[in-house]
Image (cartoon, coloured by chain):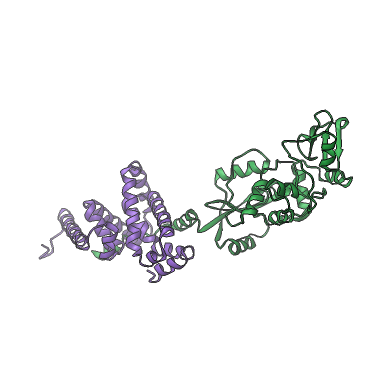
Chain colours: A purple, B green
Amino acid sequence: MCADCPARLADDLDAAFPEFLAHHQDLAYGVAMRMTRHPADAEDLAQEAFIRAYRALLGYEPQRRRELHARGWLIAIVANLGRNRARRGRTAETDLDSIASLTLDERPGPEGIAAGREAARDWRARLDALPPRYGHAVALRHVSGLSYPELAEALGRPVNTVKSDVHRGLRMLRAGLLEEAVDAGLPRKAGAR
Amino acid sequence: MVRALRSTAVPAPVSLADRVLAGVGVVHTWAEIEGPIGPLYVAWGTGGITAVERAGDPDGFETAYGLRHGRTVRRVPAMPPRMADQVARRLRGERTSGPAVDLGRLTAFEQAVLRKTMEIPYGEVRPYAWVAREIERPRAVRAVGSALAGNPVPFVIPCHRVVRTDGHIGEYGAGGPEAKSEVLGVEGVDTVALERLAATGTRFTGSDTTRIYCFPSCRHARRITPVHEVRFHTAQEARTAGYHPCRVCRPLEASPFAA
């Protein structure tokens, strides 16, 4: 992430914004994708979040832009917008589309890639199966790579709370993996418990 | 496990950045459309249309745009449908409330000149001095000429409908007098006849049945049959003869400062 981004946003917002966007779009899209689970909805959500971020920055004093914790702040915007949209039920009706597009996306290509995609899909499914509070915290920390202070800002909760959410989420994931292994009849690793 | 989780990250689609930048107006967009005398480049931002130019050199257009507006401008295949419809209607001379035009970079005077020019009906012309009088700056005729010469959105704002008080069609930023004559020709204005009429000293035509006088290109003047047509050199002459000015084209005495 660019260390002098906030300073450059403060100096000349229009000149610096494209770079800000380039640095953070994967992060914002990833979070949007987790919230909507549909590529087109995720792109809409990320687009709207960036436009809101730009308008908010326009209204900020240079001092405030300089002190911005860009990633946590941006993800908070994505998350709030995503929650509002979900509440309005915009995503519910597109579930079928999302399944269709996922299968399209993940047509078997060269085998290694296919296997990788399959593994990634399994992991996404495991995350999605967690209670949202924990799944979300784990994803922000370990998929998107946010730091704990950024995570706290994005979720609007204290640092210690989000830390324990991430740890509980990881523990649930591990427990789930163990069950999968048992269901598949694989031998337990010694001392797995 | 942590590494596996990281591998599930998905990159943003390439279209996202373009959509955001166009949405916030940091990047403007442009498209080529059909104009009255050939294709046009039309650029717009969030505030409306910002630039119109006769098609020719796309790279030069983008470069000049960047210098003038301090914005990157990116080509797209077509205008948004609503804007395209409004522009097409404006170019055909139909009544339409749009398209929105962004004149924010111009002075208040320049904006007043251009907004007034937008009121000149399709197929009619008015002198520079008329625009100056209408915006209550009767002595600023030359400044009106400069403002029109700097019209960033020719055709959409019909600066080609403003001509010299002496009847010559005058200069034109989007291709010189020939182009101006050509656009007016498309609109049904016989510029040769207007210039010939002006050369005889005629500035206004009246009807001896209605006793109203007009600019010669006013749609009401064009309805006057030859037997009832009266020609005047000055508005004073028309008034002395007992004629009233048309309420549509609002003819006025030529200003001594006329360009």
For the image, the number of numbered tags is 0
Relative to B139, is A100 on the left or the right?
A: left
Residue B150 visible from this viewpoint: yes
The residue lying furthest to the bottom in this view is A3
The residue lying furthest to the front in this view is B240
The residue sitting at 21% across, 53% down in the picture is A130
Relative to A86, is B166 on the left or the right?
A: right
Q: Nearer the viewer, residue A151 or A52?
A: A52
The residue sitting at 28% across, 66% down in the picture is A147
Residue A118 screen position, x and y as percent: 30, 56
Q: Is residue B218 above or below residue A74?
A: above
Residue B152 screen position, x and y as percent: 64, 55
The residue sitting at 64% across, 42% down in the picture is B90
Q: Nearer the viewer, residue A30 or B40?
A: B40
Residue B67 occupies which quadrant of the picture? bottom right
Residue B201 screen position, x and y as percent: 87, 45
Q: Which quadrant would the C terminus of chain A be assigned to in this image? A: bottom left
Q: Which quadrant would the N terminus of chain A be assigned to in this image? A: bottom left
Q: Is residue A5 above or below residue B77?
A: below
Residue B117 visible from this viewpoint: no
Residue A190 screen position, x and y as percent: 10, 65
Residue A90 occupies which quadrant of the picture? top left
Relative to B85, is A70 on the left or the right?
A: left
The residue sitting at 62% across, 56% down in the picture is B107
Q: Is residue A53 above or below residue A95?
A: below
